[in-house]
Image (cartoon, rainbow, N blue to C red):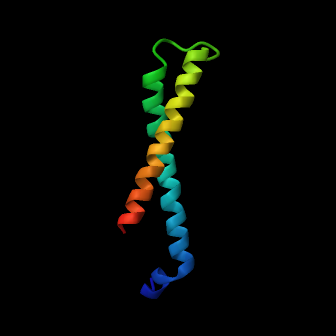
Amino acid sequence: MDPSALQSPELQQLLEQEKERAMMTEMVGKLTSACWDKCITGTPGSKFSSSESYCLTNCAQRYIDMSLIIVKRFRNMQ
C-alpha cells in the first residue's frame, strides 16, 4: 500500500468516524451494564416499574453527562 494513501484526508476522516462509532458502541455497552445492574434488582417483567424507569433514565443521563465531560477534558489537554 502506498504510504501517502494513509495520509489522505478522506481516509483520516473515515478512521475518525470508525473510532467514534467504536467508542459509542463501547459506551452504550458500559451504560447498559452499569445502569441495569444498579436499577433492575429483580427479574424484569414485561414492563419496567416507574421507579426502575426513572432510575434507568437518571443513570443513563448522568453517565452520558460524565462521558461528555471526560471527552471535553481530554480534548482540552491535546
- Identified at 51% across, 50% down, the residue is 24
Would residue 73 be found to the left or right of residue 46 on screen? left
Left or right placement of residue 49 versus residue 41 in this view:
right
- Residue visible at 43% across and 23% down in the picture: 38
Give residue 75's position: percent from left, percent from top: 42, 63
Residue under the point 49% across and 44% down: 65
- At a point 44% along the width and 44% down the height, the residue shown is 66
x and y percentages locating residue 58 in the rendered image: 53, 30
Find residue 64 and report its horizontal and vertical position in percent: 50, 43
Relative vertical location of residue 46 with respect to residue 17 in this rendering, above or below: above
Tally of numbered discs: 0
- In the figure, 5 relative to 55: above or below? below
- Give x and y (percent) for residue 50: 61, 16
Apparent side of residue 44 relative to residue 27 in the rendered image (left or right): right
Quadrant containing the C terminus in the rendered view: bottom left
Examine the rendered structure and indicate whether residue 64 appears above or below residue 51.
below
